[in-house]
Image (spheres, rainbow, N blue to C red):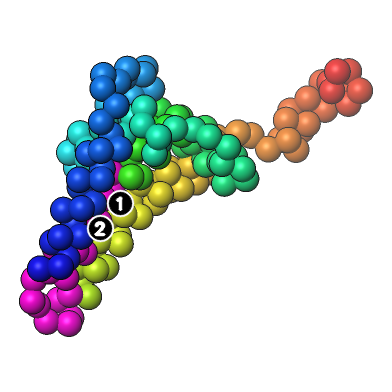
């Protein structure tokens, strides 16, 4: 029962944090809403509550922020916006924590409890996995589509000398 109390207090604190009056929905969020489908639509409804709040504001994130920005640009997911990405991460973390706390509040066996805990962790990690996987796949596709520099030189060398070809 204590776990349900903790879950309720988490939800109450989230409601207090996100209660900022009328929030302006930025164009990045609209672009993200047009990109998503499936289960992301349901988590997107929760994530929308965090746009414009202190939790998802882009502040100095240091090297981690630069890494996230680079992966967002590479993958072109989450509308390439850190604010959208952070709001989605928060939403999935809340869903994962809720699953874990509900599983702890119900008296279940150890193995099944372990499955629910792993499920909660996997759900919380999903946006990070999506970001890194999309970034890696897009970079791989770009590298495969580009011709090698040697191939370009071989095409140019028979017709002209290397110096005019490189200029």
In what element is the residue under mark 1?
helix
Which percent across, then down, holds residue 51?
33, 29
**Quadrant of the image containing the C terminus:** top right
What residue do we see at 73% from left, 30% from top? 152
Q: Is residue 136 above or below residue 21?
A: below
Camera-side residue: 125 or 146? 125
Question: Please, what is the dominant secondary structure of the magenta stretch?
Answer: helix
What residue do we see at 36% from left, 27% from top? 52
Relative placement, left or right, of 64 versus 109 is right
**Quadrant of the image containing the N terminus:** bottom left
**Magenta stretch encompasses residue 93:** yes
Camera-side residue: 101 or 72? 101
The residue identified by callout 1 is 93
Q: Quadrant of residue 87?
A: top left
Q: Looking at the image, can residue 132 be seen? A: yes
The residue identified by callout 2 is 97
């Amino acid at each position: 029962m204590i776990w349900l109390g903790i879950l309720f207090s988490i939800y109450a604190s989230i409601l207090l944090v996100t209660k900022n009056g009328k929030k302006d929905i930025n164009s990045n969020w609209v672009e993200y809403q047009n990109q998503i489908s499936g289960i992301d639509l349901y988590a997107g409804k929760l994530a929308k509550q965090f746009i414009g709040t202190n939790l998802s504001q882009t502040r100095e994130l240091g090297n981690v922020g630069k890494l996230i920005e680079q992966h967002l640009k590479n993958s072109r997911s989450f509308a390439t916006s850190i604010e959208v990405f952070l709001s989605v991460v928060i939403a999935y973390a809340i869903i994962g924590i809720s699953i874990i706390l509900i599983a702890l509040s119900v008296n279940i066996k150890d193995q099944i409890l372990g499955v629910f805990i792993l499920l909660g962790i996997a759900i919380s990690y999903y946006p990070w996995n999506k970001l890194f996987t999309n970034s890696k796949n897009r970079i791989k596709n770009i590298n495969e589509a580009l011709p090698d520099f040697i191939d370009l030189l071989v095409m140019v060398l028979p017709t002209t000398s290397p110096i005019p070809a490189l200029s």
